[in-house]
Image (cartoon, rainbow, N blue to C red):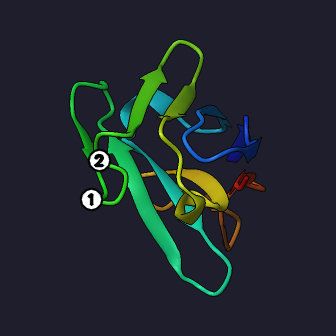
């Protein structure tokens, strides 16, 4: 199982970024997918989720109306479009499935992609 996140970077407040997460090693279309973020000194928070077919999405209150999650099952990729970014969105962003996936005895996570919102 592998997740490869990309698309992060440094952006000014009010700017936009689109994150991508390429997944492999499992039947992608059978799983809902989620984006999480982990800011320094805080726990890992669920940001957005999408059903296996893409017809249902949910968002944390803090990003509702600004972020959009989507997926392409043919490409085994999930996306997070982030608009109107705020400094408090600064974090490492990770994707994962909606059920635990394992590599041996280790929970499968990617390396994440860093998003920094600063002027």
C-alpha gap between disc 2 and disc 1: 5 Å
Instruction: Please state the horizontal and vertical placement of residue 112, each as a whole percent of the image.
Output: 72, 54
Vertically, is 84 above or below 96?
above
| Residue hosting label 2 | 64
Vertically, is 20 above or below 61?
above
Vertically, is 4 above or below 22?
below
As helix, strand or loop, the secondary structure at mark 2 comes to loop
Residue 22, quarter of picture: top right
Residue lying furthest bottom: 41
Instruction: Please state the horizontal and vertical placement of residue 40, each as a whole percent of the image.
Output: 68, 79
Which disc is residue 107 wearing?
none
Question: Is 77 placed left or right of 60 in the picture?
Answer: right
Q: Is residue 49 visible?
A: yes
Instruction: Please state the horizontal and vertical placement of residue 98, each as a whole percent of the image.
Output: 39, 53
Q: Are marks 2 and 1 in contact (CB under 8 Å)?
A: yes
Q: Is residue 99 visible?
A: no
Which disc is residue 61 wearing?
1
């Amino acid at each position: 199982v592998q997740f490869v996140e990309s698309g992060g970077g440094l952006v000014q407040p009010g700017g936009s970024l689109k994150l991508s997460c390429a997944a492999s090693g499992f039947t992608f279309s059978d799983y809902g997918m989620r984006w999480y973020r982990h800011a320094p000194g805080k726990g890992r928070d669920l940001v957005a989720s999408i059903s296996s077919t893409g017809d249902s999405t949910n968002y944390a209150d803090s990003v509702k109306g600004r972020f959009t999650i989507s997926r392409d099952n043919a490409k085994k990729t999930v996306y997070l479009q982030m608009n109107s970014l705020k400094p408090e969105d600064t974090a490492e962003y990770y994707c994962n499935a909606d059920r635990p996936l394992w590599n041996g005895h280790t929970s499968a996570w990617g390396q994440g992609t860093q998003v920094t919102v600063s002027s």
